[in-house]
Amino acid sequence: MRLGSLRAGLRKRAGAGAEVEAREWRGSVVLEGRARDWRSKVELGWYAAGFGYKGVVNDLEVEGLAPERPEAPGRPAGASLEGESFDVAVVGGGVVGCAIARELARWKVSVILLEKECDVAVHTSSRNDGMIHDGFAAKPGTLKARYNVEGNRLWGPLARELGIEFSRPGSLVLYDSRAAAALYPVMAARAAENRVEGWEFWGRGRVRAEEPGAPDSQRGGFFLPSAGVLSPYRATVALAECAAANGVRVSLETAVLGFDTEDARITRVRTNRGAFRAGAVVNAAGNWADHVAGYANDRFFSLHQRRGVDLVLDSRAGALQRHILAMPDLFQLHAKTKGGGLVVTTEGNVLVGPTAAEAPGREDYATSQAEMRELERHFRVNKLLSPSMVITYFAGVRPCTYEEDFVVERSDYVRNLVHAAGIQSPGLASAPAIAADVARSAIGILAERARVEPNPSFRAGRRAPVDPRRLSWEERAELVERRPDCGRIVCRCEEVSEGEVRDALRGLVPAASLDAVKRRTRAGAGRCHGGFCTPRVMEIIADEAGIPLPEVTKKGPGSPVALGRTKEAGRA
Ligand SMILES: Cc1cc2nc3c(=O)[nH]c(=O)nc-3n(C[C@H](O)[C@H](O)[C@H](O)COP(=O)(O)OP(=O)(O)OC[C@H]3O[C@@H](n4cnc5c(N)ncnc54)[C@H](O)[C@@H]3O)c2cc1C
């Protein structure tokens, strides 16, 4: 009955030239055939999601678009995993996988974190707004709403333990229509439903006093004080380092290529470093999580990609805005995204964005002028900011299920697999809460076969890197006395010293490329964007790694910065 009406509806919506079929599979629905174009494919997936199946597997083909496959990596240098054995393998070194690995370290179990790139936080976890959302925007009753609010509460103490900057500037949602006041009871009801605390309605005068740059057209706003900000890449690195300090093995340049299964259990994890045994497997593979689920024949959901682009304003912009600001369209409460705004960062920059557009490309970070133009409308929200303050821009890709909710659960069919998939926004805010649940499930799987003890030597913190900018002049002088390399400034825009770069290269999850150094220290993230510091940072990387300068890369294998020495090129 349900399948019949879904099929009829799909045919009606698919349009001329399309051929769409639907079949049921283990409580989910699989769409097969051909869609008119990408947009239509996504819309058909959303439509199918309205029929109450466990998940939608959207295998519709689109002419001219080959199904995306992960790149097949070669065998990297370094340790082999062949024949090894771990209690838990976590696939994916984004903020979710790293938070899960750290939670698992609370137990006396052996854990390996597998990341295909040469660093953690390379993909969505470094390409976002760094906002620890208050939880108001998430649809009530969803996992997103629940984990967002729980995660928001957890980030405060967690950031202190990890020694990373975290602040709660609060989020101020402005309105420029008199009709907005009629929505206040609806907003209050949603805040209460999502258990978001402390919100207030601010009148026009209060907004003007708090945010002098707010537009003259504003008629007040809704203030959510629990909204916070942090550096998403520093947070991810800190989680990974804390996990490593507690004995988790962090294996970079390690791509999971498949699983061997026996009796509905994963017995071996196959990677480009060899195959090993694992008692439980966690799938936190971001935009590839549906593929990874498929390796275990458990692909009961599929992901579509929602791109987001942000502009980055110079750090002087931060002094011109106190709160996270947005001025959404009035009736946006049911839209699939919040609509973007102006986010003050912990470093003093302001992020303008993000956009939200359905587009294929799981790792496509190209940006277009049209996307930049689209973002310019946000400048009206703070008239003290202007497009001349833009120093750079970036794109990220949100991994979304067709149900538009997270998948955080133990597999129904593979007895030792746990999914943390479809972690779109607010995934950063939710990560600590997701991690606690996923780690509990994985430990539960192990506990079915043997007793699992808490790890008495677990340390919640880590040795935070030195950050001279946060020190007083006296403390800085004392530091430079002890460590002269912390007095030699390498990146003038962000005031990063040679000592900090060297520390990043020697860390527990060591940086090995220019981008990895930037993620940890911000060398190259300032106004000149590496124009001055790049050669110096390259020299330090070459020195620490004992490699020739041309072997230093921007972001790992295949991304050389220098092609060779000019004099040698002249002789050739
Ligand atoms: C523009 C934009 C703005 C956003 N802003 C916010 C915000 O302000 N606040 C918020 O809460 N959320 C925000 N989000 C969402 C947030 O960034 C994500 O929810 C979060 O980063 C997802 O983390 P993850 O660990 O699941 O994924 P990822 O960071 O993508 O990590 C997954 C990792 O798995 C690895 N991997 C994949 N396949 C394999 C394999 N086979 N073997 C080994 N490794 C593999 C990948 O290389 C990747 O590093 C935003 C997203 C975007 C795009």
Image: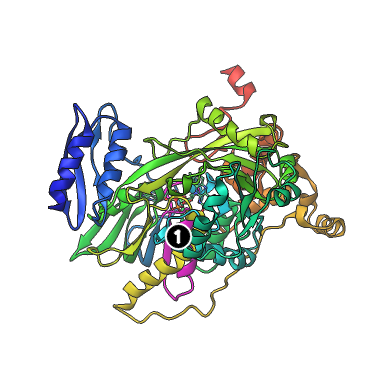
Indicate the quadrant where residue 318 lies. Answer: top right
Nearer the observer, 461 or 7: 7
* Three-letter code for the amino acid on which mark 1 is drawn: Ala
Q: Is residue 133 left or right of 33 when viewed as pictured?
A: right
Q: Is residue 182 above or below residue 153?
A: above
Q: Is residue 129 left or right of 433 when viewed as pictured?
A: right
- Name the residue rendered at 56%, 33% in the picture: 375
The answer to whether residue 136 is seen in the rendering is no
Nearer the observer, 476 or 23: 23
Estimate the x, y position of residue 415 in percent, counting from the top left: 25, 67
| 134 in magenta | no
Neighbor class of circle 1 (other Cα within 10 Å; few <14, some 14-19, many 20+) is many
Estimate the x, y position of residue 379 in percent, counting from the top left: 64, 35
Indicate the quadrant where residue 267 lies. Answer: bottom left
Q: Which residues are magenta?
A: 92-120
Local SS, label 1: helix
Q: Is residue 31 above or below residue 390?
A: below
| 110 in magenta | yes
- Name the residue rendered at 31%, 39% in the picture: 42
- Name the residue rendered at 49%, 61% in the picture: 189
Q: Is residue 74 above or below residue 437?
A: above
Nearer the observer, 447 or 271: 447
Estimate the x, y position of residue 166 in percent, counting from the top left: 65, 58
Estimate the x, y position of residue 545 in percent, counting from the top left: 59, 46
- Name the residue rendered at 28%, 60% in the picture: 268
Q: Which residue is mark 1?
A: 145
Indicate the quadrant where residue 112 lies. Answer: bottom left
The answer to whether residue 285 is seen in the rendering is yes
